[in-house]
Amino acid sequence: MKLKKQVTVCGGAIFCVAVFSLYLMLDRVQHDPARRQNGGGNFPRSQISVLQNRIEQLEQLLEENHQIISHIKDSVLELTDTGAVSPSGQLPFRSANGSWVLPFDGRPTFLSVKPQDCQFAQGRRGQTDLQMLDVYSLLKFDNVDGGVWKQGFEITYEPGEWDSEPLQVFVVPHSHNDPGWIKTFDKYYTDQTQHIFNNMLVKLTEDPRRKFIWSEISYFAKWWESADMHKQEAMRKLILGGQLEMVTGGWVMSDEANVHYFAMIDQLIEGHQWLEKNVGVTPRSGWAVDPFGHSATMPYLLKRANLTSMLIQRVHYSIKKHFASTRSLEFMWRQAWDQKSSTDIFCHMMPFYSYDVPHTCGPDPKICCQFDFKRLPGGRVNCPWKVPPRAVVEANVAERAHLLLDQYRKKSKLFRSKVVLVPLGDDFRYDKALEWDQQYLNYQRLFDYMNSHPEMHVQAQFGTLTEYFTAVYKANNVPQGARPPDYPVLSGDFFAYADREDHYWSGYYTSRPFYKSMDRVLESHLRGAEILFSLAVAHARHTGMEGRYPTSDYTLLTDARRTVALFQHHDAITGTAKENVVIDYGNRLLHSLQGLKRVIINAAHFLVMKNKDVYRFYQTEPFLETDDRRATQDSLPQRTLIELDQSGPRYLVLFNPVEQDRLCVVTVLVNSARVRVLTEDGQTLPVQLSAQWSSASQMSAEASFMVRLPALGLAVFHLYDSADTPMTLRSETLLRLSGRGQTAHAVDPLPLRSQTADPQPFYTSTQSLTLGFSGTTGLLESIRRKDDPQELKVQIQFVTYGTRSSKDKSGAYLFLPDGKAKPYSQKEPPVVRVVEGPLFSEVVAFYQHFQQTIRIHNVPGVDGLSLDVTTMVDIREQSNKELAMRLVTDIQNDDTFYTDLNGFQMQPRRRFLKLPLQANFYPIASQAYIQDSQHRLTLHSAQALGATSLESGQLEVILDRRLMQDDNRGLGQGLKDNKKTANRFRLLLESRSTGNKVVDSGPTSFPSLLSHLTSAILNHEVIALPVLPKKRGIPPLHTFAPFTGALPCDFHVINLRSIQHQVTRSDVILLFVERQYTGRYNTCRVLCLGLSSLFRNLDLQLLQPVSLSLMYSSPPMANDSSVSLEPMEISAFRLKLR
């Protein structure tokens, strides 16, 4: 209403100015001397002409004023975005085009999007020497035989090269311990890992020159908890004394393709916080030898956590060869958007095939294997090259030392310094005391010989990873973490990975999608539980009720954090573990999900109580029900049924996990087809009654209604079983049948019609979108936005890939298709269900191996501007098949497309014809898009999958893979444990401004603001919590809105995480905020955010910037300070709220 008044006032003012201008002009003409001289009042032609011109100018000004008023009016309509005004002001009605119009309160919607908000960020190219997209364009990928280094080249050197500066060699013993792969996490620990730690204590203590590095804190924490105080103190002494280094320090060695950056950060925090609390050590260097390709997000997060250096291993063999030939294996890794060097981190790329001993001492594995002393004759492991190791004794030490030094020297020729890194280890190594002796004693004899012979010009020793990096910095006379002179700067990532031939590891991007999806559900629940728990504890403390709040829920949070962290392991979320290990992961995920629902319920209970004095917590009597339930770890969730009766209302609490106010449609399952929904203050909401379908043609009832929810807040609604009201409308359902004896059964009074399908396309519309569907397939054919007269072809097709017939076949890791995809086909035509109503419309196509639901919401703002796409996949009857969803459009994207990295940043991709089909697939954690100068089409995903664009105008994603054989990468199994899986997407079509073609060629691209928000509502669904009926009645409840005002729309609250001190529960809360760089937005671009007055009814007593994993603190800021972030910056702050 206020906006309409403003328009009226502005328009009136402009009109008054125009009339007054006309008056002044006429007055001026009236007093013109020339006119008076003509005495008779007769105008000369020249004066009449001037007057006519001025009247025409005035008319033009009035027309412009009219256009300005119209533009203001349009802006107001865009802001409220009702589409039309209900004539009654209250009741829903159908507009002339057949779409529904709803009553609306006129307040701005959840970040209503103005046209200028869809301008895309202007990508500027950072100054880097190596841009990975350019490297891909340059390379031939020809796989020439390199001799002893099969994938490389012959390395030569001059004997005197080290005379003036001796070679420094750091041999770094390590043991790679997968937290689940062939065995479960617990089984590995029992059988092997605990023995590694126990032997480590003894063997490192025997000689202070011995060193070791360890990465997986999940295992270390498990050992620590079972160790006595003496063992703990001895281990702490080894770490603080520098003999044992904790590298990276994450809970696991995270995958980098499928993981979301929320979980990447969280597992890093969990490991670092555990180390700080129990050992008092801060990791300095990153170690990632086994993730199957490397993301540019990881160096950014390590840099923000104050690590100075990092190491990577699994990179395409052709890229390794190219980098080795140009001595670029060590570089500063910079983010593509960084115009300076603030994101730079020093990175070492291992040059050879693997991280095992045969591939780490130098280019010749036949020689290096002879220096893996676990393979001495008589052991269980031998050398495939048929030349076994020999124990080092006085008689052979000279020959052995010179043979090994030759490999060290050749390896050093690939780098720019005369310092060489030689990892010494493999999977689950050093679990027996014998191996510790075999490796350390033989190598020490070699080192002693080398170091005592100055003519060899070498200094060799055991070392840690950080000792190696420190020596490199010292050799280049630069501080820790600084760029050595002439070392290259690189931006980009290292996907897709191939270890040999055309064996691309692009299959695991999709393997076991059921658990990839479940992981993201758990992550969203963890974030929501963390935020609500932190707010509830702060408000309990503020009201003096901390003693009555169940702060013991913190243990449930800790358990869930560690479950999420464990599942980020590079054989867990990747879908590359044994079937029994997958079940173990699934049970952990389900257990933690149930625990998080308890945390959310308990926090919501406290926060919505109007009178906190009557708050009571009973462990056995929950106040709220969960929104859904999963019967087993591998079953889909079933929504909770809300049972209505005549005795009174059922109360429903809705949690909005997004940091902006949200206008959206919420659907709940009810036991009655007579539903009335009221807001907290008694206003009746429009309700759409529709069917809960148990099969293609069997249904019961559900209720959908439009709600406005506060940012990160809770709202209360009342549901009644009552007689029909004009605000309760029934969906109209049409079943399009093939006519072969199919019938439909409806629940009275929900109307259902059926008809024989015809090949003509059919359409469904809302106020924002019109969708066209194929009459034959029931699948999407076209999209038209209301602000775009052009209908765009967006055709959904389903295709299948087979696997090749040769000995090398697709498996859990590898994608080795038998050629181009073939169209999915089935004998029977599909059943197609069309549902239309005031709040949403949907089309569901039922096929043998999948069913696809496309739903559009008829609500203002973000929720109504994209298509909600759910594809339920079940390929358990298939054999060696991969099912893909392909979008075919008119968009002229040529060979360029964009995939996200970890939900954090976008990476431009190019389709290369010189590469095999499987090499052009990339991981998407949250989205992929194609674009031309007029349109951008984004496929937002709620789960990690593999995606590509194989032809111009196409975008496709692999939905599931069922493979009957192992792919010879160690797993020993195919993928035969498929589940019925719901793949969830949002499809967003946006118009682009002209002149974007130049920008498209750059190394950066960013989602629009609308795209960011669409991703947020997809990944963080509203959680609906029914209040359980109570015999003594329900106490008064009210809305909980944590913020005093709106957050800037390009700030994202990653987490609000409670942390613990060493002894007692801490009152310190941590806030992460990230500013997502999305272009030029007049609506919300701000420079800073004031935190002191952000939280309603809470006082901020501490504001302290900290590093990403909280291990480094800056001086506290004044409590009334404002927080300012750079675009794409992730920052962390320690807060104390009371």
Image (spheres, helix red, strand yellow):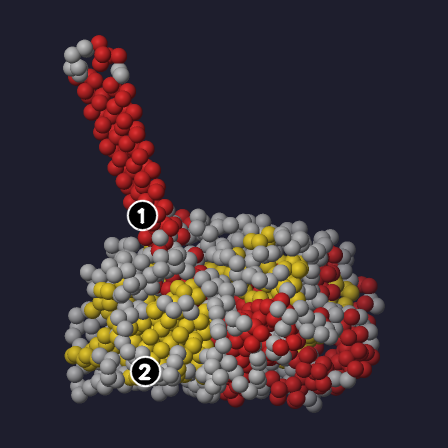
Where does the image place residue 360, in percent across and percent down from the top left? 65, 71
> Callout 1: helix, strand or loop?
helix
Where does the image place residue 133, in percent across and percent down from the top left? 48, 58
Rendering quarter of residue 556:
bottom right
Q: CA distance from mark 1 to mark 2?
A: 42 Å
Can you say whether 708 is above or below 578 in the image?
A: above
Q: Nearer the viewer, residue 97 or 168?
A: 97
Q: Which dot marks residue 803? A: none
Residue sitting at x 76%, y 72%: 239
- From the viewer's perspective, is 1064 left or right of 533? right
**Labels 1, 2: front one:** 2
Residue sitting at x 58%, y 49%: 340
Residue sitting at x 32%, y 72%: 687
On the image, numbered disc 1 is attached to which residue? 73
Where does the image place residue 1082, in percent across and percent down from the top left? 44, 48
Dot 1 amino acid type: Lys
Where does the image place residue 1126, in percent across and percent down from the top left? 56, 52
Dot 2 amino acid type: Ser
On the image, numbered disc 2 is attached to which residue? 672
